[in-house]
Image (cartoon, rainbow, N blue to C red):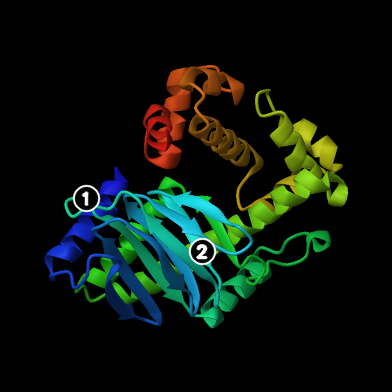
Amino acid sequence: MLDSGLASRAAFNRRRQTPAQLVENRTIYERHGAELSIYDTFAPAEKVRLDAEEVLYCGMITGKKVLHGQQQFQSDFLPHESFVMGAGETVEIDFPEARLDAPTSCLTLGISRERLRQVCDQLNRDEPLPAALGERDARRDRMFHIWHTEATQRLLVRIVDSFLSQDDDRDLVLNLGVTELLSRMLRQQGRQFLLACASTDPTRHALTAVLRHIDDHLDQPLEIDHLCRIACMSRSKFYEQFRAAVGCGAMEYIQQRRLERAREWLAAGRGVTEVCYAVGYVNPSHFTRRFHQQYGMSPKAYGQGRR
């Protein structure tokens, strides 16, 4: 499992030097305009403050944190999850499970606002959203928390390796990796915005109507021709606008949303077989295989871990 890939790199980092403190022991690596920090905490602690001077991407490696932010924001933070903070934001962190023999570890990647703006501008040029939905805005969300895919997990491993290695191409690998991570982050941010629009005002645009229909019928067969009729678009126009807005094709998106909904229900304590059929799969083995491909663990393991 790729979680163990990041965990092994955190353990390698700990072996290279003696920890200076038990709570939020920090190792810093800086290259190519980006700053990687690996934090290890070896004892329970509460309300440890984290300030973001620039855009801060956080990825959990091992253990559990509880995040506290403004406007009564509170959330568990677990491996395979990302948390992004805008410049100037602050959170306080609890470490309920940290131990000397099982540290809570995470990584943060500090990225300049200018670098984020450049990637955002490039996406708006190369993959523009429909005019009625506006442009991607790097300043839209000051904080957001997501469960990321196995592809993002592999990308994080590559980024960490580019900091730790002595390879001649490490700067190029790091530069490409950070650009890809920011692109993924901005696409996810845009998708969350579209889903919020689809939930509150599905008539805002043809695509928000389609997204609302998909979310309301995940347990049923969904055909492209029917989605085109909802959008009042030809197949070619629908494919083009959907991919530009969402970042993938409609059928791939439907599978992703089914798995995202499954993840939510598994975390709430529902059984694997029940969830399988509730999100439109007819074969539990196929469901388990797709869930593992998406999230790097079986639905049973995920449900047990969250509970």
Q: Is residue 114 above or below residue 191?
A: below
| Element type at mark 1 | loop
Towards the viewer: 215 or 66: 66
For the residue marked with disc 1, what is the amino acid?
Answer: Ala
- The mark lying in front, picked from 1 and 2, is 1
Res. 95 image quadrant: bottom left
Residue 1: which disc?
A: none
How packed is label 2: few (under 14 Cα within 10 Å), some, or many (20 or more)?
Answer: many
Let me know if residue 176 appears in the view: no
Q: Are marks 1 and 2 in contact (CB under 8 Å)?
A: no
Residue 284: x, y in percent?
47, 19
Residue 210: x, y in percent?
77, 41
| Element type at mark 2 | strand
Residue that carries the numbered disc 2 in the rendered image: 84
Please identify the quadrant where the N terminus is shown: top left
Left/right placement of residue 149 relative to residue 224 reads: left
Q: Name the residue at 40% across, 70% down.
A: 109
Residue 164: x, y in percent?
23, 70
Towards the viewer: 23 or 170: 23
Towards the viewer: 232 or 8: 8
Let me know if residue 216 appears in the view: yes
| Mark 1 to mark 2 CA distance (whole Å) | 25 Å
Label 1 vs 2, first from the N-terminus = 2
Q: Is residue 168 above or below residue 272?
A: below
Please identify the quadrant where the C terminus is shown: top left
Q: Name the residue at 30% across, 65% down.
A: 39
Residue that carries the numbered disc 1 in the rendered image: 102
Left/right placement of residue 12 relative to residue 202 reads: left
How packed is label 1: few (under 14 Cα within 10 Å), some, or many (20 or more)?
Answer: some
For the residue marked with disc 2, what is the amino acid?
Answer: Val
Q: Is residue 102 above or below residue 212?
A: below
